Amino acid sequence: MPFSINNLRNDPRVRSGESISRFVADYTERISREFEFWNASLGADHFYVHCHSVGRMAASQHRTLLNNAIQVTCSSSYFQRLYVAHKDVGLPQVWARPSVDVLTPPSKRDKLVFFSGRIQNSQVRQELITLWGNDTSMDIFSGRPPYPYEEGFKRSRYCLHVKGYEVNTARVSDAINYGCVPVIISNYYDLPFPNILDWSKFSVIINHGEIKSLKKILQSIPRKTYLSMYGNLSPVRRHFIWHQKPTGYDSLHMTAYQLWLRRGTHRLLQ
């Protein structure tokens, strides 16, 4: 369906979230009436992509689209009560960064942890700054660090991915790109490709309640285990790259494979 949420947000006729939701619902209803192939599955063999709550809420206004079509989203749970784990698909969000041919070796990573982000976006981030912001073994900043952002990923062994108010973050892919083992304060199913990649082989996943023990948890990881996770980042990196011309095993191919795996796994709801 050829419409763009971003363009709709800048269209004076439908720029509000409520108007966009109404437009998407009406448009989807029209498509479902006029095209027999949509009705053949009630939308179950279709998918829609979004990385922002406006798109999510717009799709939710059409019941069969919400229940049957596959939602492809940049995050699978952060404030997303409408995400269905067995049906929907996580999309890796990647910001344009300079390609890194040679990763900084572990011996030159002098910081245990790096994180930089706006704390007003998240209670979890506020707690993180309060607990660990003054620890000299961790570079944890409220806002931008006093050095180039990329340096934090290059000089640290572990890099935190801490949920904010919205889904707009690429810290996991940044960490992987720069060879910093991701520490995800979240849930396994919040991650892209959970049915394809074994995240335990190249990342650390903890829950919110473990933040107070964050330093102890990371320091207790055997060096052999850390080196194994660090080494596994190199082959994983190709899955977190969007090429202008797609190449094998990149983000587009991995997302398409996820969609293929999802075929027929969810029950139709009218």
Image (cartoon, grey):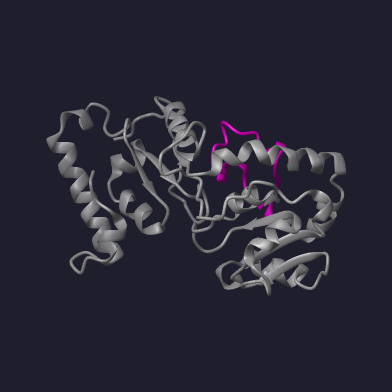
Residue at coordinates 64% horizontally, 61% vertically from top-left?
A: 150
Q: Is residue 188 above or below residue 97?
A: above
Quarter where residue 122 is shown: bottom right
The spot of residue 225 in percent (x, y) is: 82, 39
- In depth, the one of 48 and 210 nearer the eye is 48
As drawn, the residue found furthest toward the front would be 101
Residue at coordinates 60% horizontally, 41% vertically from top-left?
A: 237
Queried whether the magenta region covers residue 226, the answer comes back as: no
The spot of residue 95 in percent (x, y) is: 51, 55
Please state the total of marks drawn on the protein image.
0
Q: Is residue 267 left or right of residue 21?
A: right
Q: Is residue 241 above or below residue 87?
A: below
Residue at coordinates 70% horizontally, 55% vertically from top-left?
A: 159
The spot of residue 227 in percent (x, y) is: 80, 41
Queried whether the magenta region covers residue 203, the answer comes back as: yes
- In depth, the one of 120 and 99 nearer the eye is 99
Whether residue 230 can be seen here: yes
Q: Is residue 151 left or right of residue 94?
A: right
Q: Quadrant of the N terminus?
A: top left
- In depth, the one of 94 and 84 nearer the eye is 94
The spot of residue 29 in percent (x, y) is: 19, 44
Whether residue 222 can be seen here: no
As drawn, the residue found furthest toward the left would be 34
Q: Is residue 32 left or right of residue 87?
A: left
Q: Quadrant of the C terminus?
A: top left
- Write the start and end of the magenta stretch as one range: 184-208
